[in-house]
Amino acid sequence: MKLYDGGRAPNPRRVTYFLAEKGIALETVPVDMGQLEHRSDLISRLNPLQRLPVLELDDGTILTETVAICRYLEELHPDPPLFGTDPLERALVEMWQRRVELHFFMAVAAAFRHLHPAMQGWEVPQIPEWGEANKPKAIEFLRLLDGELAGRAFVAGDRFSIADITAYVSVNFMKLARIPLPEDLPNVRRWHAEIAARPGMGSIKP
């Protein structure tokens, strides 16, 4: 297998953390998104959407989309489980993964893509009003999550999961999106510090 990786971009970073937590080593092909290499003929052929990461299997099959890639790797390497261990736990992980992705990750991404000057050539047209509108959406979700984390260690329950990876990357992404992390979120801050200290996560710079 061969992973076409986009470095510190949020979606590639989610797969990188997933691999680290699993202890999986893959052949990796760096793609410099700053130089628009994700729009090259090679990446366009592998993924017409010109998005990363891309996983190329040994038989030539191409997998794109972060969670799809992680699900495939989970099937090949079930331990440690990052998508749950029984029907209820898997459903809870799926629920929180989608909540985090749809209501937090995407809000932070919208703020970044529509407000950051570096994205002017990527997001056409940039709509600053939409970027600003998403900042409070991200904070609103974090306040909900802070209440949830008052009663458990991880986003989806008592076990670390892909939902934690997505939330952790989203919090880190807030800095680039210029969304300050509120001080009055003690449970989110405690959780974030604990996730950052994990061997698999702490070995990689945010």
Image (tube, grey):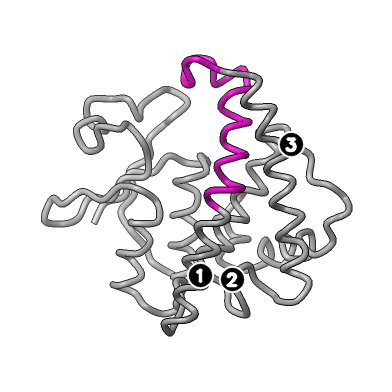
In this view, the mark in front (3 or 1): 1
Residue 39 at x, y percent in the picture:
32, 25
The amino acid at mark 3 is Ile
Q: Residue at x 33, y 58 (%)?
A: 26
Q: Which residue, given by chain and number where applicable, does mark 3 sit on?
A: 179
Asked if labels 2 and 1 touch by Cβ distance under 8 angstroms, the answer is yes
The amino acid at mark 1 is Val
Residue 117 counted in the magenta span? yes
SS state under label 1: helix
Q: Quadrant of the N terminus?
A: bottom left
User: What predominant SS class does the magenta segment belong to?
Assistant: helix
Q: Label 2 neighbourhood size at 10 Å, few (<14), some (14-19), many (20+)?
A: many
Q: Which residue, given by chain and number where applicable, does mark 2 sit on?
A: 156
Q: Give the CA distance from mark 2 to mark 3.
A: 24 Å
SS state under label 3: loop
The segment highlighted magenta reads 101-126
Residue 149 at x, y percent in the picture:
73, 69
For marks 3 and 1, the one nearer the N-term is: 1
Q: Residue at x 25, y 37 (%)?
A: 47
Residue 21 counted in the magenta span? no
Residue 182 at x, y percent in the picture:
83, 47
SS state under label 2: loop
For this view, does 105 lie left or right of residue 2?
right
The amino acid at mark 2 is Ala
Q: Which residue, given by chain and number where applicable, does mark 1 sit on?
A: 93
Q: Residue at x 72, y 68 (%)?
A: 148
